[in-house]
Amino acid sequence: MIRDLGKRLSLFRETAEMAFDTLRANKMRSALTVLGVVIGITSIVSMTALIRGFDESLRDSIRAFGPRTIFVQRFGALSFSSGASFLELVKRPPLTVDDGLAIERLAPTVAIADTWLGTGGPPTQQRIFYGEERTAPIVVMGVSDKYVEVNFAKILLGRSLTPQEVQRRRPVVVLGHGPYEALFQPKGIDPVGKFVRIGALRYQIIGVVDKRPSMGGFGPSPDDFAIIPYTAYRKQFGSERIRGGQFGAASVMIAVVPRDDVSRDDAMREVEAVMRIRHGLTLDKPNDFDLVTQDAILKVWDQISQAVLLSLVVISSIALMVGGIGVMSIMTISVTERTREIGVRKAIGARRAEILFQFLIEAIVLTSVGGVIGILLGSSIGFLVNVVSGFPISMPWWSFALGLGFSAGVGIFFGMLPAWRASRLDPIEALRYE
């Protein structure tokens, strides 16, 4: 048993050495043969690194809101994922600050309900000016004094809003880390107490929110925002009841945090009941609002990421198939060129299985070399994108194993026919071949 295993390992080593000799003897032909495999594996590894990195970053951003937080929206990704038409969704009534106050007052299981104006739909975006400096357009939200607590945010400098500032419509602002970095941090200026201009009005900075989990440059940064009292927001941008947004109403979202001693599902049921009563919905009518949780968002993202990965596999498979056809063509030519060699080997006792094994190993080595090159190129592309743009990447070990497995599988599948033809050659006819 051990002796047979040793013979097989020796045969495998010799065959692999012969395969590498063949590659070295035909460098240009081998390079062109594995080009399709290299392209396919490069796309698999690089795109897996980028998609996985973005996936982990996005999940961190979603988890930052907490697993128990419930968001009430006019409509969002959940409505679209359920198949609702856009024309139906824009007919839904807008949410208001009074909805949030009613939820907090009428739902005993709710600890906090905070209404955010200027988000939850097409956001309110404005530049922030400080002296000669200005930011790019960032999200400006009108919130209550509970925003930091609901959003699980940390204050880096200064403080958050107070109930008195909200009640009296004070022109004060808490900056996100993005505008703080753009306007103050490079010059080492303490922003607390300074005045900035948002649109046409001046606001005094009272605090700065610390950095939040980022999606690595994909889409708007979660740090590019500023919060002002929702009463001041109404004064500057108009009431959410009368202000016409891009889709007929202002962008409003209500963030609800259940009490610690109750379950999130119980709180959701109470929030749903309050909202249905406020919107005058009868039992036979569906909700005209969305209740969104961390789990629901992650479920929608799972569907999207799976579709993206499936598309990646399909696209990469096309390149691998092209490479596999090239491998089959070259191996067929190699069998024809080495017909006499096959005849000699069979004449001195080589069996069909050994001939089959020899050419199959050559095909596997050929495509595996392409797989290794593809892995190196794909990893380099991922690191380059990360260095240049800061886009998050993730390179799990299974992506490399997947690349090698795919490349070896291509060698086995497309190399089988030429290897089988070589093993079936008649030794006498092969020796006569010129």
Image (cartoon, rainbow, N blue to C red):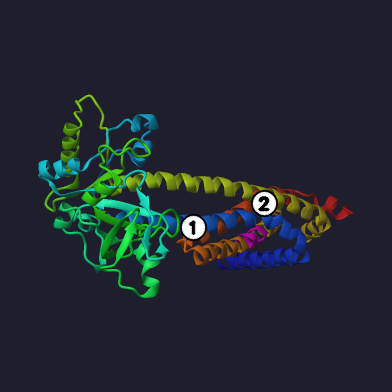
Q: Residue lying furthest bottom in this view? A: 188
**Vertical side of 37 occupied by 303: above or below:** above
Foreground of the two, 238 or 263: 238
Image point (59%, 53%), residue name: 409
Circle 2/circle 1 CB separation < 8 Å: no
Foreground of the two, 96 or 352: 96
Q: Name the quarter where the C terminus is drawn.
A: bottom right
**Picture coordinates of residue 217 (x, y %)?**
45, 59
**Picture coordinates of residue 391 (x, y %)?**
47, 61
Magenta span contains residue 315: no
**Picture coordinates of residue 226 (x, y %)?**
31, 57
Badge 2 crowding class, 10 Å Cα cut-off, few under 14, some 14 to 19, many 20 or more, is many
Image point (58%, 47%), residue name: 315
Q: Disc 2 residue type?
A: Gly
Name the disc covering residue 323, or none. 2
How many marks can you see? 2
Name the disc covering residue 50, or none. 1
Q: Disc 1 residue type?
A: Leu
Q: Name the quarter where the N terminus is drawn.
A: bottom right
Foreground of the two, 119 or 193: 193
Q: Looking at the image, is mark 2 or mark 1 earlier in the sequence?
A: 1
**Picture coordinates of residue 262 (x, y %)?**
13, 48
- With 199 as the anchor, is 45 left or right in this view? right
Name the disc covering residue 326, or none. none
Based on the displayed image, in which of its 4 quarters is residue 241 positioned?
Answer: top left
* Secondary structure character of the magenta stretch overall: helix
**Chain part drawn in magenta:** 365-371
Magenta span contains residue 369: yes
- With 2 as the anchor, is 286 left or right in this view? left
Visible residue check, residue 145: yes
Callout 1: SS: helix
